[in-house]
Amino acid sequence: MFGSKKDKSNSIQDETLKDHSKKIVIGVSVLVFTIVLILILEIYTVSLKGSQAKKINIGKSAEQKSKSIITEMAKIGKETKDLEYKYIKSLETIMSPIEFQSFKNSISGLANKNNVFISTLNEGKSFKVRDYKMYSINMALLSKYNDYVNFKKDIAKTPFRINFDKETIIRETPTSSKIKINAVISAVVYEQKDKLFKDKKKFIEQMKRAEERKLAREKKLKELKEQQKN
């Protein structure tokens, strides 16, 4: 009997140990799983933060590049406007076809003013020079030498680019005080000038105002410097 009780007790203890062993295995498994899960979550969180930081850095870099590009484009735009305005200003000394005709018609008045007699005054053949054309006026004149000099001075007051070409001067007669002149006045003409100035009217006015403001600032700064010296 005692033997059977002892065997039964040992059997119960074995079963208890088995139960505890299972619980320990399960507990350890759960603990290991929990630790692994925590590690995975931590790695994912770090990775996510790193990814977000990387995205933020990429975004900041893109924003800086965008600002740099916009600044550069604005600079290029300003330089382009300045060059365009500079080109348009250079055309102020070049005649349009209408301005050429007006200039040609003014020659008669200048001749009368300076006692210069015009024998012939006619327009010569034009020819192309790059984007422009060279117009010409053929003249045959009779006057005293000083009157002719004054006549040329008055013509030279024009704001446009002109040139006296093929000028020949001879005395009218061996004993005469008058001279005979044959000359050609050439002028650079831009045939699209009137259209360009009409199309760019607002732009020209805007750039002129900006130029005037700049000159006013420079003048004021110069005056302030002069006052500081005194």
Image: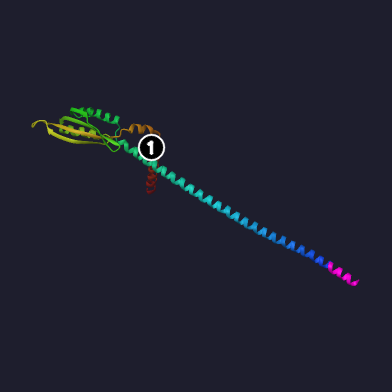
Task: Identify the residue position indicated by label 1 in the image.
Answer: 208
- Magenta highlight on residue 7: yes
Q: Quadrant of the N terminus?
A: bottom right
Residue name at image x 46 percent, y 47 percent: 69
Overall secondary structure of the magenta section: helix
Quadrant of res 171: top left
The one of 179 and 94 positioned closer to us in this rendering: 94
Q: Is residue 43 above or below residue 144?
A: below
Quadrant of res 152: top left
Name, please, the residue furthest toward the right: 1
- Percent of width and height locating residue 208: 38, 37
- Percent of width and height locating residue 96: 30, 32
Given the image, on which type of amino acid does mark 1 rest? Lys
State the colouring used for the structure image: rainbow
Element class at badge 1: helix
Quadrant of res 110: top left
- Magenta highlight on residue 113: no
Residue name at image x 69 percent, y 59 percent: 33
- Percent of width and height locating residue 224: 39, 45
Query: Mark 1: few, some, or many residues within 10 Å (few <14, many ≥20)?
Result: some
Name, please, the residue furthest toward the left: 174
Bounds of the magenta span?
1-11
